[in-house]
Image (cartoon, rainbow, N blue to C red):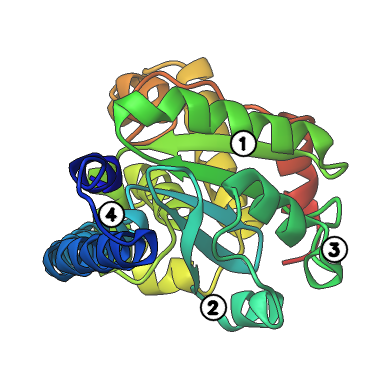
Amino acid sequence: MANKIYDAFEHVTADSRLKESTMQYLSDKRQKKTRRFALPVQRVLAAACILAVLLLGAGGYSWFLAPVSYVSIDVNPSVELALNKLDRVVSVTAYNKEGKELLEGMSLKGKKYTQAISLIVKSDVLRQYLTPAEDLVLTVASDSSRESSLMAGVGRCSSQIRHGCRSVSVDLDTAADAHSNGLSVGKYSAYLKLAQYDDSVTIDECKNMSMSQIHCRILAHEHSAGHGMESGSGHHGESTEQKPETNEAAQETQTSSAQPETGAREDGHQHNGCHGGH
C-alpha cells in the first residue's frame, strides 16, 4: 500500500517536502485504519482460544483423574493405587492403620505405578513387615485390554523385590465389590478364595488378618481336602464331593483370565508364614 501511495504522487508537481509529508500522512492513516479493524479480530481469536483451552482443559483434567485400574500392595499393611489411562497414580488408599502409617509422608500421585510400587516396598515402614513369615501380594484389577501390560509391570517390580512375593489379577467387578466392602482388591480376592472352603468366614474377620494368616487358613483347608481325597471315599462320602471344588480353588479367584502367579518362593513362603508371625 505504501508503494501505491508513492506511485500516485510520482507525477504530481509540488514541493518535494509537501509531497513527502502528504504521502507520510496518508500512509499513517492507512496503518491506523488497518490496526483498528485488526484489533477486534485479534481479540475475538484470543477469546476463542482461551475458551477452547478451558473447555478442553476441563474435559482433559477429568479424563486424567478418572481411575481405570487398580494395584493393591498387601502384607499386613494394605494399600491400593488407583491408576488413570496413562498408568499413573491418581489416588492412594490405605485400608488399615498399618497402611496409613506406611503412606504417611509419601508423595505418589502423578507417578508411574511401577515407580509408586517401588517406593512403597522399599520404604522403611514396609520393610519391617517383610519377614520370612509374611506374604507380600501385588494384585492388579483392570479390564482385559490393560491386564497384560499392568501384570508385566508388576512382574518386573516383583523380580526386583528381595522378599518373595506373588502377583494376582482380578477383574473390575471384583474391584468394585472389594471397595464396597472396605477391602483392597488383593485382600478381597484372598477372602473370596478362603470363603470357597469356609463359608463361615466374614469380611470383617479378613480385614483384621494379614495376607499370611488368610493364606495359612487356605492352605490348611487345601491340605485337609487333599488328605480326604487320598484316604478314599469309603464312609466319608463328602470327601469325594470335594475334588471339583479343590481343583477350582487351586486357581486365583475371580481372575479375568488364567493368569499365573509370579514371584519367588511361593509355596515355601506361604508355608513359612503358617509357622511364623502375623
Amino acid on which disc 4 is placed: Trp
Q: Which mark is residue 63?
A: 4
Amino acid on which disc 1 is placed: Val
Amino acid on which disc 2 is placed: Asn
1 or 4: tag closer to the N-terminus: 4
Q: Which residue in the structure is indicated by mark 3?
A: 127
* Residue 6 percent location from the top left of the image: 28, 46
Inter-mark Cα distance, 2 to 1: 22 Å
Left/right of residue 237 with respect to residue 39 in the rendered view: right
Image position of 120 with respect to 70: above or below: below
Which residue is depicted at the point 36% across and 31% down?
255
- Does the CB distance between marks 1 and 3 fall below 8 Å? no
* Residue 144 percent location from the top left of the image: 31, 26
Inter-mark Cα distance, 1 to 3: 18 Å
Q: Which residue in the structure is indicated by mark 2?
A: 96
| In front of the other: 181 or 154 | 154
Left/right of residue 243 with respect to residue 101 in the rendered view: left
* Residue 231 percent location from the top left of the image: 51, 19
Number of the front mark, 2 or 4: 4
Report the quarter where the C terminus lies: bottom right
